[in-house]
């Protein structure tokens, strides 16, 4: 049991160290030796857990993808209204992107060559979820007249992915105030009159994951 726990800690240290190096240097320039130094383990210990740099990158992406799934599942459990669920999820996602290098690296890895096509595309995963929630809002009549789920999802996905990418260099793009400004501008055009007054642009307690 002690050996298993030690192995699990070593693996987690390697995943986090890899995420830090990938986020700093990019996948192509990241080296196994720099990841090992950051994790404080030998090359042999790394290869015991991961056969290659590609395998390490996939582990980072998988952990990041699991975190995104946990975010959307959490807001779904805590908030039945689809538009508020969407607002809450954007706040939770940006907070995690700001705080957790594994999630930042996971998003970045899937959208960059040579990982593209051989990676878990977190941006596509996020896009599918946004589209799903907005279709739900459309079905229940929560969208403003003349606004379709398809059109709204383009705007929301483009904005949130833009915040994620810009936030790599300037964290204020992922801040609560930036998201509140976005939703304050967006919601009067997006939500029906009946729904608009019930929405909280700063997020509800469901957003605190």
Image (tube, grey):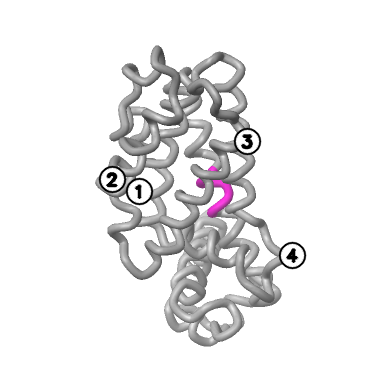
Say whether disc 3 or disc 4 marks the residue closer to the N-terminus: 4
Q: In the rendered structure, find residue 150 and report the number of the disc placed on it.
A: 3
Viewer-closest of 156 and 32: 156
Question: In the rendered structure, which disc, 1 or 3, sits on the residue that comes first in sequence?
Answer: 1
Residue 202 lies in quadrant? top left
Q: Secondary structure at mark 3?
A: helix
Q: Position of residue 160 (x, y in %)?
A: 46, 49
> Which residue reaches farthest front?
146
Instruction: Report the disc number at residue 117.
Output: 4
Q: Earlier in the sequence, mark 2 or mark 3?
A: 3
Q: Pointer 1 and pointer 2: residues touching (CB < 8 Å)?
A: yes
Judging by the rendered image, the residue that carries numbered circle 1 is: 95
Q: CA distance from mark 1 to mark 2?
A: 8 Å
The residue nearer to you, when weighing 125 against 198, is 198
Counting residues from the start of the chain, the first of labels 1 and 2 encountered is 1
Select label 1 or label 2 by which is in front: 2
Q: Position of residue 182 (x, y in %)?
A: 35, 43
Left or right, 97 with respect to 172, comes to right
* Neighbour tally class for label 3: few under 14, some 14-19, many 20 plus, Cα within 10 Å: some
Q: Which residue is mark 2?
A: 176
- Between the C-alphas of marks 3 and 4, the distance is 25 Å
Chief secondary structure of the magenta portion: helix
**Which comes before the other along the chain, label 2 or label 4?**
4
Tell me which residue sits at (50%, 66%) in the image. Answer: 10
- Per the rendered image, the range of residues in magenta is 64-68
Q: Is residue 193 magenta?
A: no
Dot 4 or dot 1, earlier in sequence: 1
């Amino acid at each position: 049991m002690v050996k298993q726990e030690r192995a699990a800690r070593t693996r987690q240290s390697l995943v986090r160290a890899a995420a830090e190096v990938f986020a700093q240097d990019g996948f192509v320039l990241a080296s196994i030796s720099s990841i090992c130094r950051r994790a404080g383990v030998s090359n042999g210990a790394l290869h015991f857990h991961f056969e290659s740099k590609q395998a390490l990158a996939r582990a980072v992406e998988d952990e990041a993808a699991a975190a995104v799934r946990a975010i959307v599942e959490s807001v779904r459990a805590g908030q039945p209204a689809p538009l508020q669920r969407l607002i809450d999820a954007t706040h939770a996602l940006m907070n995690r992107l700001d705080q957790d290098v594994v999630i930042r690296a996971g998003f970045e890895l899937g959208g960059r060559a040579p990982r593209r096509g051989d990676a878990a595309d977190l941006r596509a995963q996020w896009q599918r979820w946004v589209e799903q929630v907005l279709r739900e809002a459309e079905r229940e009549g929560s969208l403003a007249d003349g606004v379709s789920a398809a059109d709204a999802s383009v705007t929301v996905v483009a904005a949130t992915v833009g915040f994620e990418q810009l936030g790599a260099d300037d964290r204020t793009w992922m801040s609560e105030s930036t998201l509140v400004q976005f939703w304050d501008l967006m919601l009067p055009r997006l939500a029906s009159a009946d729904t608009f007054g019930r929405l909280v642009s700063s997020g509800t307690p469901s957003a605190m994951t």
